Image (spheres, rainbow, N blue to C red):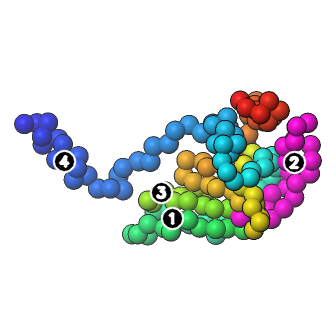
């Protein structure tokens, strides 16, 4: 009987009390997903510049923010080639910031990032979600080397 009561109480719990649970992001998994995609991707290590005020405000009101918000940004760094992160890359990009319910992706202005940019005729796009998306802020040296190895070998 106590289990039934506990189950009913759990179902009646307010939804905002539920926490978003994310799998630990992995540069290898992100690399493999980009490689297997029919879309074209480039990998860039650099400084991301974005207006923080344009990000959706997670949980700022009684209703959820839009599922997707596009935000202009720039990234200044180096693109990954077979020889490593050597070629300069400074471009305007579009952040595609996703929200899952009241939780939204974000990244700090001026952050050092490892970014997997989707490229098409309209430009470069960076997917960001509450669990990270295609961006890794303050990447460790080992992460950069792992992505270089994946790229040189064609697989991880």
Label 2–label 4 contact, CB within 8 A: no
What crowding class fits label 3: few (fewer than 14 Cα within 10 Å), some (14-19), or many (20 or more)?
A: some
Q: Earlier in the sequence, mark 1 or mark 4?
A: 4
Secondary structure of residue under mark 1: loop
Q: Earlier in the sequence, mark 2 or mark 4?
A: 4
**SS under mark 4:** helix
Magenta residue span: 74-94
Which residue carries the number 2 mark?
Answer: 78
Left or right: residue 110 versus residue 56 is right
The answer to whether any part of residue 112 appears in the image is no
> How far apart are labels 2 and 4 at the CA level?
53 Å
Q: Which quadrant would the N terminus be assigned to in this image?
A: top left
- Of residue 109 and residue 133, the one placed in the foreground of this image is 133
Pinpoint residue 132: horizontal percent, then vertical percent.
Answer: 60, 48
**Disc 4 versus disc 3: distance between alpha carbons?**
24 Å
Mark 1 or mark 3: name the one nearer the start of the chain: 1
Q: CA distance from mark 1 to mark 3?
A: 7 Å
Residue at (55%, 47%) from the top-left corner?
A: 131
| Label located before the other in sequence (4 or 3) | 4
Residue topped by disc 1: 67
Label 2: state its secondary structure.
strand
Residue 9 badge: 4
Q: Which residue is denoted by mark 3 in the rendering?
A: 100
């Amino acid at each position: 009987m106590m289990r039934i009561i506990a189950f009913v109480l759990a179902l009646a719990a307010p939804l905002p009390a539920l926490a978003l649970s994310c799998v630990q992001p992995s540069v290898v998994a992100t690399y493999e997903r980009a490689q297997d995609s029919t879309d074209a991707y480039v990998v860039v290590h650099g400084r991301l510049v974005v207006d923080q005020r344009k990000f959706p405000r997670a949980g700022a009101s009684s209703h959820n923010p839009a599922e997707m918000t596009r935000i202009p940004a720039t990234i200044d760094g180096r693109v990954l080639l077979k020889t490593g992160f050597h070629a300069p890359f400074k471009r305007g990009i579009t952040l595609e910031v996703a929200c899952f319910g009241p939780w939204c992706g974000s990244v700090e202005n001026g952050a050092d990032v490892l970014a997997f940019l989707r490229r098409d005729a309209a430009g470069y796009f960076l997917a960001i979600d509450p669990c990270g998306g295609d961006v890794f802020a303050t990447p460790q040296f080992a992460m950069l080397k792992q992505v270089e190895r994946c790229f040189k070998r064609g697989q991880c």
